[in-house]
Amino acid sequence: MNAKSAYRFVSLACGAMCLILAIGGRTIAAGIFGAAAGVFGYLAGGER
């Protein structure tokens, strides 16, 4: 696994955690995981 695919996987995992926390009402934690997903998505090159 190269770094780019690892960043994509971590971005996906953080995005899923963000969604779960947002549904559960933990808005601060959801914001942190959402920001992390954005950072890792940016590091992966922004390709979808």
Image (spheres, helix red, strand yellow):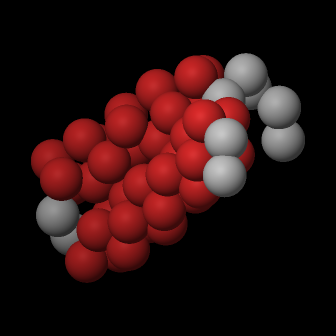
Most foreground residue, 25 or 17:
17
Residue 45 at x, y = what percent?
73, 22
Q: Residue at x 60, y 36 (%)?
A: 3
Q: Is residue 4 left or right of residue 35?
A: right
Q: Residue at x 47, y 41 (%)?
A: 37
Q: Position of residue 41 (x, y in %)?
A: 60, 33
On the image, the x and y values in percent for residue 19 come to: 44, 65
Task: From the viewer's perspective, tell me whether residue 34 is left or right of residue 6.
Answer: left
Residue 8 in sight from this viewpoint: no
Left/right placement of residue 11 relative to residue 45 reads: left
Q: Splitting the image into 4 quarters, where does residue 4 fall? A: top right
Residue drawn at point x = 25 percent, y = 41 percent: 32
Place of residue 35 in the rendered image (x, y in percent of width and height, measured from the top left): 37, 34
Can residue 13 be seen? yes
* Residue at the far right in the pictured view: 48
Up-down relation of residue 41 to residue 9 (above or below): above
